[in-house]
Image (cartoon, rainbow, N blue to C red):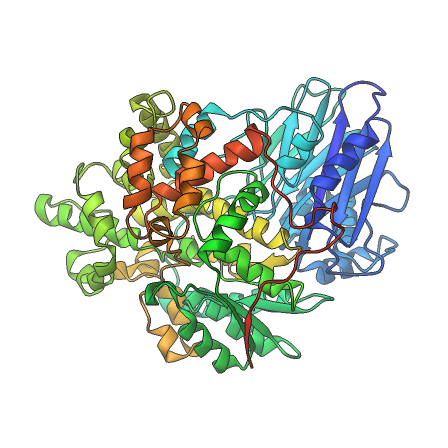
Amino acid sequence: MCGICGIISREQGGPVDRGSLETMMAALAHRGPDDEGVYLHGGVGLGHKRLSIIDLGTGHQPMTNEDGSVWIVFNGEIYNYLELRRDLVREHSFKTQSDTEVILHLYEEIGERCLERLNGMFSFAIWDARQQRLFAARDRLGIKPFYWHLGRDHLAFASEPKAILAAGLTTARPDSQGLEEYLTFQFCLGDRTMFDGIRRLEPGHYMTFRPLRDAEPAVVKYWDFNYEIDTHHTAEYYVDQLRTLLHDSVRLQLRSDVPVGAHLSGGIDSSTVVSLAASLYGGDFHTFTGAFREGPQYDETRYARAVAEHVHSVHHEVWPTATEFADVLPTLIYMMDEPAAGPGLFPQYAVSKLARQHVKVVLGGQGGDEIFGGYARYLVAYLEQCLKGVIFGTQEDEKHLVTWDSIMPNLPLLQQYRPLLQSFWREGLFEEMDRRYFRLVSRIEDAETLITRDAWNAGSQGRMFESFSAVFNNPATKSYFNKMTNFDLKTLLPALLQVEDRTSMSVSLESRVPLLDHRILELVTRMPPTTRFKGGDTKRVFREAVRQLLPQVVFERRDKMGFPVPLAEWARGPIRDFLADTLLSTRARQRGVYQMDGIERLISHERGFGRQLWGVLCLELWFRAFIDGDRPSMPHDTGSGRRPQPAEGHTLQ
């Protein structure tokens, strides 16, 4: 796990400034405090900051092949590198034991098709001097980041936009459509970012660029979700296959030359990962969780403790406070580069900080809700379709059917989602499926009271629905469930993985996500929707596959809500001044973005688990950090020469 960056000159013989490259590397120091390296030759500069996980002694980067004609900078882990290496040693003389060298030689053998063989999380850039070509790629699910900027005389890339900005290669300006997308969804779609001129390489894509020949990079999709439904196998077959793949994914992702632990929330996803990992790990296995003291709805530690006791892990807890939230959030938004996908960013950072005291790698359960259909909104959407079917005699194609009779037993799960139901059915009942799901995922409720017409208006909504529809209606499937989960896998999941990446790397911790093994995705997306979501039973196949792994109290719970933060309660008390100083300030008023009367009311009346206050708070802190240039202190700023002090935690053994 590392930070990578590079500058490729578009001019014949044009030199790359070493100072600019080193400035980019300095901005990525938190991603790799263990080692660093530079490759600088003519019009090519590659930089690397290393967090040493595999082959601690000889995995230095940038790394080259035997004759020095191909160079690589790599961020991530290739979990099947040992298996790939066994084939490659017949043709190549390896100098290291690292997974980086495996990518390098595999590329030499089969070029871009090397991506088909890699099982892992990765972003990397290869400079092929033989072809005078840059080849850069990102893993299938977008677990590891890659951003790029094309200037008049250069192409620059980095693990984080702040590195490109720090080197002065482009100016920080808001992207107008990116702002509209953030206001609508609280994340950007596709390759767009909040920064004008900076793009992300999308998950499952690679890019090539010949600086002296190409006007711009060629971006190619090499992998996507496959919704060609396999109806030839039984539900029992899928459960068995899933169980096998879960075990193998965790086995592979435990490979490390440094200590490994796991995040443990007490939900079924992280509990499954912990149960499998603890059974396979040699030695004490550490688990980490966090909660808030503001009430039982913010405290799931009893479930996490039940799992920890079940697997005999060394368990640690941390209890973040409102004061810490106000103190650290400006820095966290800077670390994120773009406004965050949800307030869970804050406790996730606190748990990562706690974990870094004890291990250098953590496993987590990220992705389970998107893969297996765990969100309550899927049930809400199908409830409406069932009502529509009963009233109007309409239904989906038979093989995708969720009937009124079958969905009824699962409706009590929606008791805690009354505000969502009220908002969803306030208007637009029985519209087309895309219109209805757009309403479920949109965060722009009451926009006219919070956002000025210059920033978001009726035209914005039309543009955002078109952007949404391009993703939602893209898969060749009639299944409403597949359309919903596909949209979340393509948009929400990358946003959540951005949080995963930045919160862990901000404290130099590697985070791995075994549920996002691409083999699992390929199995699940080809299952009949009736197998995945029969009767609206969320995570049905997954639950059957892991039934024997978990304590009964965890397996039977149906009230998991992610990592809720008591932001509404804090807004009326301990962080009210922080919110007012940020959102009601002269600078905020002069943005031309916020309706100040509405913002003032929102601070006092945000509903529990609401996302409106969070959305505008993160946006304003982003404006301050990147557009105004108020750079907060970084966790590993070199000015003091000191590492941050570890978070206070509680240990159970």
Judge by depth and name the residue closer to the eye, 293 or 71.
293
Residue at 62% across, 24% down: 171
Q: Is residue 443 above or below residue 263?
A: above
State the quadrant of the C terminus.
bottom right
Quarter of the image where one finds residue 371? bottom left
Left or right: 638 as drawn, with respect to 587: right
Q: Is residue 116 left or right of residue 244?
A: right
Q: In the figure, residue 177 lies in which quadrant? A: top left
Residue 127 coordinates in the image, percent (x, y) = 78, 36
Q: Residue furthest right?
A: 67
Compared to residue 391, the image places residue 543 above or below, namely below
Q: Position of residue 520 (x, y in %)?
A: 50, 58
Q: Is residue 179 above or below residue 485?
A: above
Residue lying furthest left in this view? Answer: 391
Q: Residue at x 59, y 29 (%)?
A: 198
Closer to us: 486 or 60: 60
Asked if one can make out residue 193 in the rendered structure from this viewpoint, the answer is: no
Indicate the position of residue 244 as horizontal and vertical percent values: 52, 69
Quadrant for residue 436, please give it: top left
| Residue ID at (68%, 66%) | 255
Classify residue 184 as left or right of residue 169.
Answer: left
Q: Is residue 98 above or below residue 205?
A: below
Q: Residue furthest front?
A: 577
